[in-house]
């Protein structure tokens, strides 16, 4: 069986790094890599040469039995993949439900990495958590770069500078990393999350937890936020507005799986913030937590910069590729038996992530 590693078209990351190749080949398979697949992440073709063949994109699509990528091949390329092949990628079927019909029409098996259950058993395969951790870290660095003020307190002969006030909305993996990074940079950090389990984690990082009572139970949501009542959302928005108007930096990460991200920062709130303040919206791809967010764009409103970017992990391509590669390798270990794919639907990880077969 041949596994193919695609080069990403508009992303500097690569799905598999050279160090993982020997472990993949030990599963009894052959590996080919598209020319320059790792170049954006600082892995040149020579680094892959010892364990894999370097081939053109067309050859890889036509000959591979299993194809791995970060972003799925486009519609035109799906028709070039041989029937019955397996594609491992992030198809995001909740956001793009039409992808299922496209894979079925091409007679391809789709395994969507973003659909892997977020359970203890599947932690080593959880690309969402791996990338979210990087995004939370990078969000703070981007905010610090854009903010025309210091993050930490400074006491100098010329005067004292107060620490920046940072508000993190959503204390999942990305939010917790953002909190930790902002604290390390010396900011005064507050965090908000509807999930009951988040409070203890926020406090353990030294941040203040902003609590709004009356949130809907989320214990069965697998680590995701759940849709809240309109009454709760109104109270939530009022509390967030009060905190946000006094913040120098807001980092938003709140998303609802399969639905639009909750709108938590209204235009009126942005207009109350100090000029020069920064909002980094990591929920931009699903609508954004800020009313003014534009996906993949940075806009300035009333002197406040609003960065809509759900893909900040791609700005750290080398470490992001390393972590993504390890996640995929751990999935391959349960997916491939004796050199062949075993789609064991009794396995909750395979059952949860396989969107067509």
Image (tube, rainbow, N blue to C red):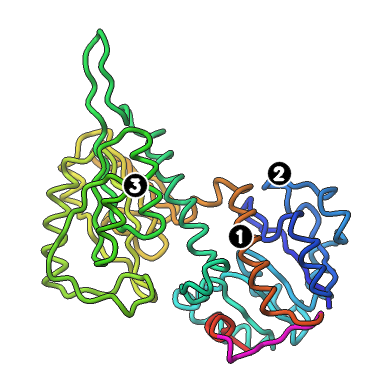
Q: Residue at left 85%, top 61%?
A: 52
Q: Main secondary structure of the magenta part?
A: loop
The residue indicated by pointer 3 is: 179
Residues shaded magenta:
339-347
Tell me if label 3 and label 2 are in contact, CB under 8 Å.
no
Mark 3 or 2, nearer chain start: 2
Compared to residue 63, the image places residue 44 above or below, namely above
Residue 330: horizontal and vertical position, in percent? 64, 69
SS class, disc 1:
helix
- The alpha-carbon separation of the residues under discs 1 and 3 comes to 23 Å
- Quadrant, the C terminus: bottom right
The numbered disc on residue 324 is 1
Give the CA separation, mark 1 to mark 2: 15 Å
Tell me: 161 left or right of 344. Answer: left
Question: Camera-side residue: 221 or 266?
Answer: 221
Q: Quadrant of the N terminus?
A: bottom right
- The quadrant in which residue 334 appears is bottom right
Q: Nearer the viewer, mark 3 or mark 2?
A: 3
């Amino acid at each position: 069986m041949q596994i193919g590693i695609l080069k990403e078209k508009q992303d500097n990351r690569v799905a598999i790094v050279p160090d993982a190749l020997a472990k993949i080949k030990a599963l009894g398979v052959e590996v080919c890599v598209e020319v320059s697949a790792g170049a954006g992440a600082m892995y040149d073709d020579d680094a892959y040469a010892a364990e894999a063949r370097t081939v053109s994109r067309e050859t890889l699509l036509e000959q591979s039995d299993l194809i791995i990528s970060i972003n799925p091949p486009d519609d035109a390329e799906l028709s070039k993949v041989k029937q019955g092949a397996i594609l491992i990628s992030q198809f995001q079927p909740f956001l793009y439900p039409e992808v299922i019909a496209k894979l079925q029409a091409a007679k391809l098996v789709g395994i969507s990495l973003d659909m892997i259950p977020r359970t203890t058993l599947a932690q080593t395969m959880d690309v969402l958590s791996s990338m979210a951790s990087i995004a939370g870290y990078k969000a703070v660095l981007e905010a610090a770069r854009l903010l025309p003020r210091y993050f930490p307190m400074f006491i100098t002969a010329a005067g004292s500078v107060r620490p920046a006030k940072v508000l993190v909305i959503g204390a999942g993996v990305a939010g917790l990393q953002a909190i930790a990074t902002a604290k390390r940079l010396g900011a005064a950090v507050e965090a908000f999350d509807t999930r009951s389990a988040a409070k203890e984690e926020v406090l353990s990082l030294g941040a203040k937890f902003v609590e709004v009572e009356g949130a809907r139970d989320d214990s069965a949501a697998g680590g995701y936020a759940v849709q809240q009542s309109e009454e709760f959302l109104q109270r939530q928005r009022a509390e967030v507005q009060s905190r946000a108007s006094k913040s120098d930096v807001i980092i938003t990460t709140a998303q609802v799986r399969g639905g639009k991200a909750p709108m938590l920062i209204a235009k009126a709130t942005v207009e109350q913030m100090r000029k020069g303040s920064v909002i980094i919206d990591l929920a931009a791809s699903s609508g954004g937590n800020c009313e003014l967010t534009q996906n993949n764009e940075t806009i300035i409103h009333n002197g406040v910069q609003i960065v809509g970017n759900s893909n900040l992990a791609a700005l750290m391509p080398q470490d992001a590729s390393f972590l993504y590669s390890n996640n995929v390798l751990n999935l391959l270990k349960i997916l491939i038996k004796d050199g062949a794919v075993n789609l064991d639907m009794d396995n909750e990880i395979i059952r949860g992530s396989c969107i067509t077969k």
